[in-house]
Amino acid sequence: MPSPLTPTLQGSVGLPYQGVLAGGRELPLQGPGYRVAKPPGRNFGTPSLVSTIEYAAAEVARQRPGPPLDVGDLSARWGGQITNHRSHRSGRDVDLLFYVTTVAGAPIESLGFVPFGADGLAQAHGGPHGDRYIRFDLERNWLLVKALVTAPSSEILWIFVSRPVEALLTEYALARGEDPELVWHAESVMLQPRNALPHDDHFHVRVACSPDETVAGCEDGGPRWPWRHAPPSLDWPESEDGIEELVAGPSLAPLP
């Protein structure tokens, strides 16, 4: 953990399910195209995660104005374990509720964590007039995924979501003529998690460690996607005869 004895550990430290957050940034409770749907105190993340949420929500609102994106939990101020989550401990995770419409297709505000089936329909409970059916907003949810994977502020490691919802999004994107490479990128990071709920009621987004964050103590615990930045490497100085050697003390022999 960050301490006076380990001053270089900053930002997202450790793994998403076993880590802490040092110097995190607070996501404002409301901004262009979004609102925080949970009580404050769990809306802290790395600067890259917070910037990505703000960028993606604003981009969807710019292209298709409508009800705001409801943002669920990020992490606590200093990370660590929070209730109802096994991850969300190091400032690189966020829950984003789906955009929804009426059955007829009119955008409406989110009704909470409502599970959607393969037909894109869900039955919402607890309304003033009893249960009602709502539809998964394919257009706005695809714009959200597209904005997330193309955001300049970070690299998306995973978007945890159920297989039927992933299929709806990729089929919609291909049908509307999106770049196949972009769709492949989005399809690669969308994943129904194992040994967990299927995530048919929200997106669980996880950003990757940046090279600088990796040096400072961040651990991905995930795949090295081909579009990601290369991990940091040590540039060892070369001796006069061209053999690389460690410059850490006279007792260390040159590397073979």
Image (cartoon, rainbow, N blue to C red):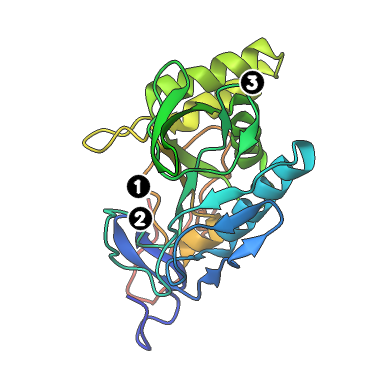
* Local crowd size for mark 1, using a 10 Å CA cut-off: few (<14), some (14–19), many (≥20): few
Question: In the rendered view of the protein, which quadrant contains the N terminus?
Answer: bottom left
Q: Which mark is residue 16?
A: 2
Q: CA distance from mark 3 to mark 1?
A: 25 Å
Q: Are the residues flagged by discs 1 and 2 in contact, CB closer than 8 Å? A: yes
Q: Which mark is residue 87?
A: none
Q: Which residue is mark 1?
A: 221
Q: Quadrant of residue 88 in the image?
A: bottom left
Residue at the limit of the structure toward the top, as seen here = 175
**N-terminal-most mark, 3 or 2:** 2
Amino acid type, residue under disc 3 in the picture? Glu
Q: Secondary structure at mark 1?
A: loop
Question: Who's the residue at 39% across and 62% down the image?
Answer: 90
Residue at the limit of the structure toward the bottom, as seen here = 4
Mark count: 3
Q: CA distance from mark 3 to mark 2?
A: 28 Å
Q: Which residue is mark 3?
A: 181
Q: Are the residues flagged by discs 3 and 2 in contact, CB closer than 8 Å? A: no
Residue 182 at what x, y percent from top left? 64, 25
